Amino acid sequence: MSGSPAGPGGDDPGAACGSGPGTAAARLTGRRVTGERRLTGALAEVTLAGGQVVMVKHDDTPGAIRAEAAGLRWLAAAGTVPVPAVHGHDRHRLVTDRVPAGRPTGAAAVRFGRALAALHAAGAPAFGAPPPGGPADAYIGRAPMRNTPGADWPHWYAAHRVLPYLARAVDDGTLEHAEAAVVERAMARLPELAGPAEPPARLHGDLWNGNVLWGADGQAWLIDPAAHGGHRETDLAMLHLFGCPHLERVLAGYQERAPLAAGWADRMGLHQLFPLLVHAVLFGRGYAEQALAVARAALER
């Protein structure tokens, strides 16, 4: 999620009790540790015997590590967009591969678009379905996200993605009741605005640019998922919302593999309402105003 830290930040509480990232990596991988480099309070690079470098992430939020590990494995199981392998986890630590950094290129963007289309096509049991082994109470960035399965995308999206955060924004004073009513009216019209019905897609779920790593191998890798079953246009809408290098090339590759339904660009704002409201709750009024603009535009269609 844009602007979201990798973990709770600050000093690593595990380090004080002798369970810092190196210790955790050794325990979770069963391998000797030869080096450790702290990147943030929540993230470290650890070198294992033999030279392999892994990432160790710390998060005390209940269920967050379990959700992320399950999401990474579910995305990896599709065999499409590469994701870092999970080497082990417990309640507070996650050990994954490190992705050697490269740079975004047009060719890599086209490959990413094709692979993302294939990932979505791998499907999900239902809209809102969590990854196998993942908790229903998951997260998008630092915000809670409940995965409650539903059969109908417009009603599920309104009830379990948009309206809960709309209510939270009102409770926090970020949105006025009259403003919230605008979003509610847009959601009431969602069945007629949502476009052709599609099967549940296997979503990354938090696909902003910061969660796309351009690897030295010439591929785009996905990290930090909020994976669930959803509408494939939602992932693409988030790439648009927060920007992505060579986005037009990504879309060209996607359309080559799995053409989007007519009118998808006009529906983009509806799919952006969820991340905009999440950001409104986490970061304030500016994102609430963007959400209102999207809802008003939808009501004018």
Image: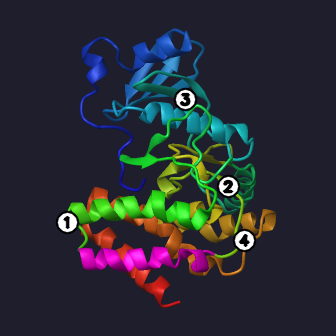
Provide the secondary structure element on which disc 2 rests: strand
Of the numbered discs in the image, which one, if any, rests on residue 173? 1
On the image, the x and y values in percent for residue 89 come to 50, 23
On the image, the x and y values in percent for residue 240 come to 53, 69
Which of the two residues, 154 or 88, is positioned nearer the viewer here? 154
> Marks 3 and 2, how far apart in space?
25 Å
On the image, the x and y values in percent for residue 193 come to 58, 79
Amino acid type, label 1:
Gly
Compared to residue 216, the image places residue 243 above or below, namely below
Amino acid type, label 4:
Leu
The image quarter in which residue 76 lies: top right
Which of the two residues, 261 or 20, is positioned nearer the viewer here? 261
Compared to residue 176, the image places residue 142 above or below, namely above
Q: Check contact, mark 1 vs mark 2: CB within 8 A.
A: no
**Can I make out residue 36 in this image?**
yes
> Marks 2 and 4, how far apart in space?
13 Å
What colour scheme was applied to this rendering of the protein? rainbow
Provide the secondary structure element on which disc 1 rests: loop
According to the image, label 4 marks what residue?
260
Amino acid type, label 2:
Ala
**Can I make out residue 244 in this image?**
no
Amino acid type, label 3:
Thr
Which of the two residues, 218 or 264, is positioned nearer the viewer here? 264
**Of label 4 and label 1, which has the lower sequence position?**
1
Q: Nearer the viewer, mark 2 or mark 4?
A: 2
Magenta stretch, main secondary structure, is: helix
Q: How packed is label 2: few (under 14 Cα within 10 Å), some, or many (20 or more)? A: many
Of the numbered discs in the image, which one, if any, rests on residue 96? 3
